[in-house]
Image (tube, rainbow, N blue to C red):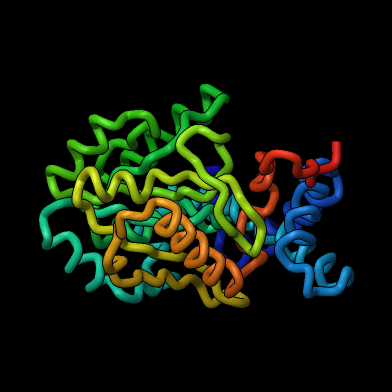
Amino acid sequence: MKVMAALPFRWQLTAGGQIGRLLGRIGRRRRKIAAANLALCFPERSPAERAELLDQHFTALGIGLFETAMAWWAPDEQLHDLAEIKGAEHLEEALARGKGVILLTGHFTTLELGARFITWRQPLHAMYRPHKNPLYETVMRRERERRSRLPPLPHDDLRGLLRAFRKGQAVWYAPDQNHGLRNSAFVPFFGIPTCTITATSRLAALSGAAVVPYFPRRLPGAAGYVVDILPALDHFPSGDVLADTQRINALLETHIRQVPEQYLWVHRRFKTRPPGSPNVYPL
C-alpha cells in the first residue's frame, strides 16, 4: 500500500479501476450482494442501467484501495492539489460552541481519504469497530492516529467519546451500517424499512455536541476530490429519536444519489429485516 500511495495519481486511478473490475468478476458473493442492494434502491433504473452502475461501483472499490493507501501514507504536498474543501466555516462555527462536534458521514469508497482532508482543518477522533485481522487493525489504528492527530475511539468507548466532546473535540462518525437490532430502529432508507443505528440522536442529546454532516466525492477523470461540509443540523436532536434517525437517512440518501457508484454497496445494509420480511440476499 505504501508503494501504491507513491504512484502518480493517474496511474492509481487506472490501476485501481482495473483491480476493481477484476474483483467484480471473481468476488461473486459480494457482487451478488451489491446487485441486490442496487435493485432495491434503484428500482426506477433498468436492469442494464443497474448492471452498468454495478460495474462502476467495483471500479470505485478498486480505486478506493489506492485512496486508502494515499490517506495513510501520501505526504500532504502530494494531496493538496487534489482536494477542495467547501464549507469549512460550518465546522469552525460548530466547534466554537465548545461542546464538541459529531462529524457525520457515510461509508463511501473515499471514506479514508475524505477524513484525511478534514484533518487539514481540524484534528479528529474516528469512531470505529476493530478489524478482525490483527495486522490490518494495527496498521489502520496507527495510521489513522498519526494522520488525524487524535486517537481513534472504539465504538463502545462511551466514556472516551463523552470526554472528547467535553474537550470540544471533533469525532468522525458514520451510522449507516447494519449492526443488528440493538440500539437500532427500522426507518426508511431509499424507501425501504432499514435497521438503522439511533445513536447519533442519543449522543447529541447526551453531550450537546453539534452534528456537522460532510460528504467526500471523487470528481470525474483525474480532477481530484471535493469535500462538502454542511451546516450543523438545526433543531437536532428534536426529542424524537425515530424522526432524527430518519432525517439522517434521508440526508445520506440525497448525497449517495449524487455519486451512487462511490457508496459501499457490497455491505449487507438490509441484512436485518422487519419481522416476516424475506431475506433480500442470495445464499
Residue at the (78%, 74%) spot, across then down: 44
Considering every residue shown, the one lying at the far right of the view is 48
- The location of residue 153, given as percent across then percent down, is 33, 35
Residue at the (68%, 54%) spot, across then down: 265
- The location of residue 47, given as percent across then percent down, is 88, 68
Residue 146 in the figure: left or right of residue 246: left
Residue 12 in the figure: left or right of residue 106: right
- The location of residue 11, given as percent across then percent down, is 63, 63
Residue at the (18%, 36%) spot, across then down: 163
- The location of residue 166, given as percent across then percent down, is 13, 43
Residue at the (24%, 58%) spot, across then down: 210
Vertical arrangement, residue 71 with respect to residue 163, above or below: below
Residue 138 in the figure: left or right of residue 40: left
Q: Quadrant of residue 51?
A: bottom right
Q: In which quadrant is the C terminus drawn?
A: top right
- Looking at the picture, tell me which residue is in the foreground, 14 or 210: 210
Vertical arrangement, residue 175 with respect to residue 12, above or below: above
